[in-house]
Amino acid sequence: MNTVNPFDEQPSTPQSLTLREHEIEIRVRYQETDAQGRVHHATYINYFEIGRVEFLRAAGYSYRQLEADGIYLVVAEVSCNFFRGAMYDDLLQLKTSVTRAKGVRIRHEYELTLDGETVVTGHTVVASVSPDGKVKRLPPWLVIND
C-alpha cells in the first residue's frame, strides 16, 4: 500500500502518468452511515472521489495544482455495484485504477473491500474542462496510450 504525506511538495509537471493503480485505507465515519449503522449508498461515490484524489497525489501531482494549471476534472459518468454492507468504524481498502486516459476523458475503476471481501465495485469517467467549462484535452502527461 502507498502511504502519502499530503503536505509533501508536488512537482510542477510530471513527465508521464506511470502509476496505474493505487490503494488506500478508509475508516467509515459515523456520519457516513444510515439509521441501521451501514454505510449510506451515496457515500461510496465520495469514497471514489477520495480514491481519485489520492491516486493523482501518489502519481506526483495534486488536484489543487491541476486546477491551478487550468484543468478541471468533472464527473461525466458514475456507476456503483453493491455486494455487501460496511458498518461504522470498518476499515476498508479502496483500490483505484486508471483503465483509460485519452482525449478529454479518464476512466477509473474501483474496488472497495473489507477483510478481503468485495463491498462495492464501480467506475467513473471524468472529463477535462477549462475554468470556463469548455472541453479541454488532457495534458500529455495524463494520457495513457496502450
Image: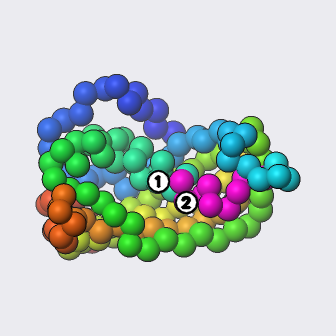
* The residue positioned farthest toward the front in the image shown: 132
Report the residue at 62% width, 61% height from top.
Answer: 42
Quadrant of the rendered image containing residue 136: bottom left
In the displayed structure, would residue 130 be above or below residue 33?
below
The image shows residue 76 at horizontal and vertical percentages of 38, 72
Which residue is under mark 2?
45
- Can residue 91 be seen in this snapshot? no
| Amino acid at dot 1 | Glu
- Count residues near mark 1 (Cα–Cα under 10 Å), then give few for <14, some for 14-19, many for 20+: some
User: 129 or 113, which is in the foreground?
Assistant: 129
Quadrant of the rendered image containing residue 21: bottom left
| Amino acid at dot 2 | Ile
Label 2 residue SS: helix
Report the residue at 23% width, 49% height from top.
Answer: 67
Which disc is residue 40 wearing? none
In the displayed structure, would residue 20 be above or below residue 29?
below
Which disc is residue 49 wearing? 1
144 vs 76, left or right, is left
The image shows residue 78 at horizontal and vertical percentages of 49, 71
Q: Check whether the beta carbons of the residues at disc 2 and disc 1 lie within 8 A of each other.
A: yes
The image shows residue 124 at horizontal and vertical percentages of 45, 68
Q: Is residue 14 magenta?
A: no
Rendering colour mode: rainbow
Total tally of numbered discs in the picture: 2
* The residue positioned farthest toward the right in the image shown: 36
Distance between the alpha carbons at the discs numbered 2 and 1: 7 Å
